[in-house]
Image (tube, helix red, strand yellow):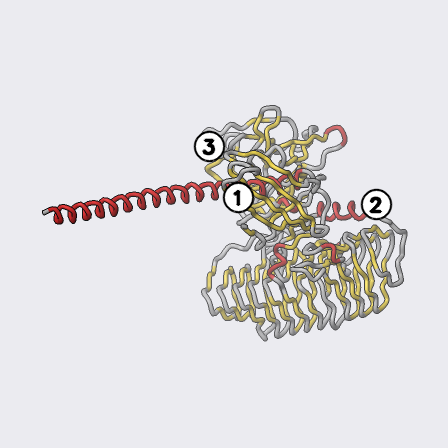
Amino acid sequence: MINQKGQVLVIVIAALGIVLFTVLFIIAGAQLYFQNSAYNVNAEKATALAEAGIDKAINALNATGGNYTGETETSLGDGSFSVTITPVDTTTSIIESTGYVPNKSNPKAKRTIKITTSKGVGIAFNYGIQVGEGGLELGNSNLVKGSVYSNGSITAGNTNEITGDVWVAGGPQPNPDQAAPDCVDNNCQDFIFGRSVNGESHLDVAQSFKPQESGVLNKVSIRIKKFGSPPNITVRILQDDDGEPDKNAVLTTGTLYASLVTASYGWIDITFNSSPALTQDESYWLMFDTSSDNNNYWSWQNDLAQSYTRGVPKWSPNWSIGNAQWNSFNGDLAFKDYLGGAPTSVRANSSKMEVGGEVHANTIQNLEIEGNAYYQTIITSTVNGTSNPGSADPPPKVFPISEANIAEWKDQADGEDNDNTTGPISNCVSTLGPIKVIGDVNFDSGCRVTIKSPIWITGNLTMNSNNVLTLDSSWGAGSGVMVVDGTIEMNSNNHLNGTGVGTSLLMGLSNYNSPQNGGLAAIKVNSNGNTGVYYASSGIIEPGTANSFKELTAWGIRLVSNSVIDYETGLSSTLFTSGPTGAYTLLKGTYQVK
């Protein structure tokens, strides 16, 4: 019995030990679980703090024109963050932000985020070729690797091919139907919106107008400037409701692209997603919808003389709510509206032009279309996709660079720290820019020139053969521009190169007005081996024969024969060097968490 009792005691003690161990194990596991949960929560907080530091850094860089250098520790919520800025080159910096919970000296959790940011004007080259009202002429045997968007008609010879989509918009009338013009001297006033002004939330602003004729709305232009780096604005055309914008009658929407606007007033074009029909002498509203930001906002030029008699301006804190409050003020906001013109078309010779994507045009003739077709009229064409007769004409597209952008580049080239010359320059130089050249620049043959953007040439730019112009390596992934008030002309084997980093490019831009000069070319390229990106918003580009370009944008383009446009999709996010108004933005693919 005694032995049995002893055995029972041993069993009881062993069972108690197992129970005690199990309980302690469960308690320890629970404690570890709660510790891990608490750490995970703190880690998430630290990540959020680090991201807040990134947001603060980008905003501060834009607000200070790039003079922000970081901060050692800033308290926020349940923790703090620190930021360091490391310049890489002229346009690019690395931002490293670390979040701490509860603080930097005794952190329970810490996370670091690292990004690369670049400053500049974002230029969206979305098409291999973009053309204005002058239209596109394709000779024979040309290849466009990309899409084409034209605000004027396209005509083509034999054996041409476009691998992407073709869009031909309905062109505008040359003169505005309605215009509230520039103000004069003391009648000029800034109408600030996109922020609170004297306790009033000027977030939505509208200008009414009455068309002189009935027609479809093609585009509008407004005279505007910006403060800081505000985002794009949604623009609407609304019908009138007893002297106010009718929120239930939005006819179309468009976008005011912030990249086209600078710190100085300029006329900025806006196009829309569709082209609504407007009726003569009926009131309509051009309305801009923003959110409040005291550091990043807008100013629309206001004419206190009230010389425009067919409309009035108003502002509202919120246009979209029921019984929205619209407030009147004195003046006329500077705008122009353009109605549509004659129907446009895309036509090729009997040996059909091949299109690898879709075609959108009023009239289509002699095309072999791999994708869908949208049209009013189609003649002797093959559609391998779906035909869509009765489709509305495509709306026009604004050009990716504004006159305000060009004026800013000129101001930067003409800066006090730059060595301006009277010109002409007629010999090979090793380095050029930033500079304003008063006169012509002539490179004969075999020049190797490092370009420091921007360059402003008041005369003509001429290159004979075998010249290579390369953007200085300090621009990194950024791009540069040579602004030429006259013409650009080159013979053979001339190259405009970026830095070689990413999609960096060097663009030749001509301000020459071809329609006002008898149709003479603004940019004329001869033959064989020329490359680059060229831009002439008021002129005609003649790209010659047997050349290869990344992108062409012009009022009109005459592509003769055997040339290749090899568009790079990365050009849609190209950043051009600019003055203090150039926005710092995150470079995609550089976000890292440590």
Q: Position of residue 303 (x, y in %)?
A: 69, 31
Residue 561, numbered circle: none
The secondary element bearing badge 3 is classed as loop
Look at the numbered discs 3 and 1 and tell me whether their residues touch, using CB distance below 8 Å. Answer: no
The secondary element bearing badge 1 is classed as strand
Q: Position of residue 75 (x, y in %)?
A: 56, 34
Nearest to viewer (mark 3 / mark 2) = 2
The secondary element bearing badge 2 is classed as loop
583, 393: nearer the viewer: 583
Query: Residue at the spot x=69%, y=52% of the render?
Result: 88
Tell me the amino acid under the disc marked 1.
Answer: Lys
Mark 3 sits on what residue? 321
Tell me which corner region of the image, top left, top right, bottom left or bottom right, holds residue 193: top right
| C-alpha span from label 3 to label 1 | 43 Å
Judged from this view, the residue extending furthest toward the front is: 2
| C-alpha span from label 3 to label 2 | 51 Å
Tell me the amino acid under the disc marked 2.
Answer: Asp
243, 53: nearer the viewer: 53
Residue 110, numbered circle: 1
Tell me which corner region of the image, top left, top right, bottom left or bottom right, holds residue 556: bottom right
Tell me the amino acid under the disc marked 3.
Answer: Ile
Judged from this view, the residue extending furthest toward the left is: 1
Label 3 or label 1, whichever comes before in sequence order: 1
